[in-house]
Amino acid sequence: DTEVTQTPKHLVMGMTNKKSLKCEQHMGHRAMYWYKQKAKKPPELMFVYSYEKLSINESVPSRFSPECPNSSLLNLHLHALQPEDSALYLCASSQDGAGLSSYNSPLHFGNGTRLTVT
Amino acid sequence: SQQGEEDPQALSIQEGENATMNCSYKTSINNLQWYRQNSGRGLVHLILIRSNEREKHSGRLRVTLDTSKKSSSLLITASRAADTASYFCATDRKYGGSQGNLIFGKGTKLSVKP
């Protein structure tokens, strides 16, 4: 089990649906991340939140909308997705946030949400 | 674009043997990290080596870093069936780019046969 909890574990949605992925950590980490991983590929960074503020958006399409309600929670809102968006969506956290020498901090990953868009 | 490139892409060994995976990267880095991923699960951090370090050990893991060659290796000694997983190296960018942009290599899929 990991200390980063992601829900749901599996999600099937149509292209017209709106859904949300949730991520929670209680380690006091100040940075949280969304990664997308296609089969047999490495994780690709989507968003980074540092101290609850969006610090990195890796040119992700607007049909993906991140939200960080507080330091423990991270959401990813999904709307009008395409079948090619089907993937494993991984949330991660690290101890320190942007602006410090902290990008040495290891990432702690959740087990992901397996998303299928039909 | 990918920063790290692992080789081999796949490695199959017998239990008890050692497994060596290599990672090459392109730009200057602050540190290099290795992660393991079991099928369909999240990644687990294994070890971090800073740019001013040359070698680091953790249990059965040994990591080396050669910044002049922009390469790193991960050695798993006395492998076990439970070591079967994909292994990724990950680097951050030292100059320019976005701070905190940890970039993962393509990974090595290790299979340890009992």
Image: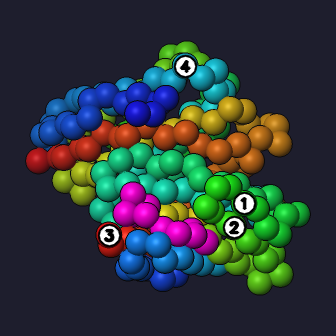
> Tags 1 and 2 in contact by the CB under 8 Å rule?
yes
**Whole-Å distance between the Cαs marked 4 and 1?**
29 Å
Q: Amino acid at mark 3?
A: Pro
Which label lies toward us, 3 or 2? 3
Mark 2: few, some, or many residues within 10 Å (few <14, many ≥20)? many
Q: Amino acid at mark 1?
A: His
Residue A91 position (above or below residue B20)? above
Numbered disc 2: secondary structure: strand
**Whole-Å distance between the Cαs marked 1 and 3?**
25 Å
What residue is pinned by disc 1?
Answer: B57
Give me the chain letter of mark 4.
A
Q: Amino acid at mark 2?
A: Val
Mark sitting on residue A26: 4
Numbered disc 3: secondary structure: loop
Considering every residue shown, the one lying at the far right of the view is: B52
The tag earlier along the polypeptide, 3 or 2, is 2
Give me the chain letter of mark 3.
B
Q: Looking at the picture, do discs 3 and 4 lie on one chain?
A: no
Q: Amino acid at mark 4?
A: His
- Membership of B12 in magenta stretch: no
Which label lies toward us, 3 or 4? 3
Name which residue lies at 63% across and 36% down.
Answer: A94
**Whole-Å distance between the Cαs marked 3 and 4?**
38 Å
**Whole-Å distance between the Cαs marked 3 and 2?**
24 Å
Residue A89 position (above or below residue A4)? below
Q: Residue A112: percent from the left, percent from the top?
A: 36, 41
Mark 1: few, some, or many residues within 10 Å (few <14, many ≥20)? some
> Tags 3 and 4 in contact by the CB under 8 Å rule?
no
What residue is pinned by disc 2?
Answer: B63
Which label lies toward us, 1 or 2? 1
